[in-house]
Amino acid sequence: VNGLSPYVTYTVECTSSNGEDSCDSNMDTIRMPSAVPSGPPLDLRAVPARDSAILTWDPPAEKDQNGVITGYLIKYQLSSDPSSQMTRTVGAVTQSSLDNLMTGETYNFTVAAINSNGTGPDATMVMFTTIPDIQNLKIS
């Protein structure tokens, strides 16, 4: 049988087309093996503060999880410096805090779901800007 989805339970029924063949059991239930998540986390959001941000997201659509989500890979970087990319892995939670960020800077972040088979695709990147440090602002 082709076209079965990963980590989905199917009920298989044994029937005979000529009425003479027999089956050991008429019905059986099988679960397909898990696979790497095929879809990204959804609805990424950031609530920036002075030198930190709270990131939140929703899990991938159930049909795209392809198994039990065991964690998430967070990637973030300064928008002005792609080589500044940092990564962090968190457990099966849908919120994380980024600390020790530079004040008044714009960052990009994305998240990917992880299961026992690997890491799925990144979500669409989201931008946020930390709150500027008022002490360093110059008034003209």
Image (cartoon, grey):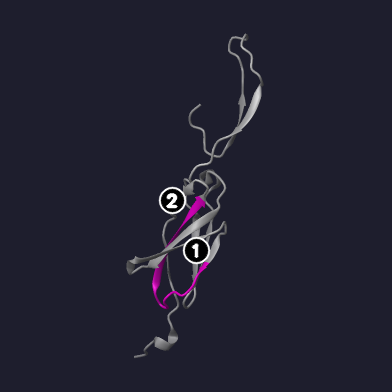
Q: Which residue is mark 1?
A: 45
Q: Position of residue 113 (x, y in %)?
A: 50, 53
Check if residue 104 falls in the magenta segment: yes
| Magenta-drawn segment | 97-114
* Label 1: how many Cα within 10 Å (few below 14, some 14–19, many 20+): some
Q: Which mark is residue 121?
A: 2
Q: Secondary structure at mark 2?
A: loop
Of badges 1 and 2, the one in the foreground is 2
- Which numbered circle lies on residue 130? none
Q: Is residue 118 magenta?
A: no
Q: Is residue 92 above or below residue 105?
A: above
* Circle 2 Cα neighbour tier, 10 Å, few/some/many (<14 / 14–19 / ≥20): some
The residue under the point 40% across, 87% down is 136
Q: Secondary structure at mark 1?
A: strand
In this picture, residue 81 sits left or right of residue 117: left
| Residue 126 pos. (x, y %) | 43, 62
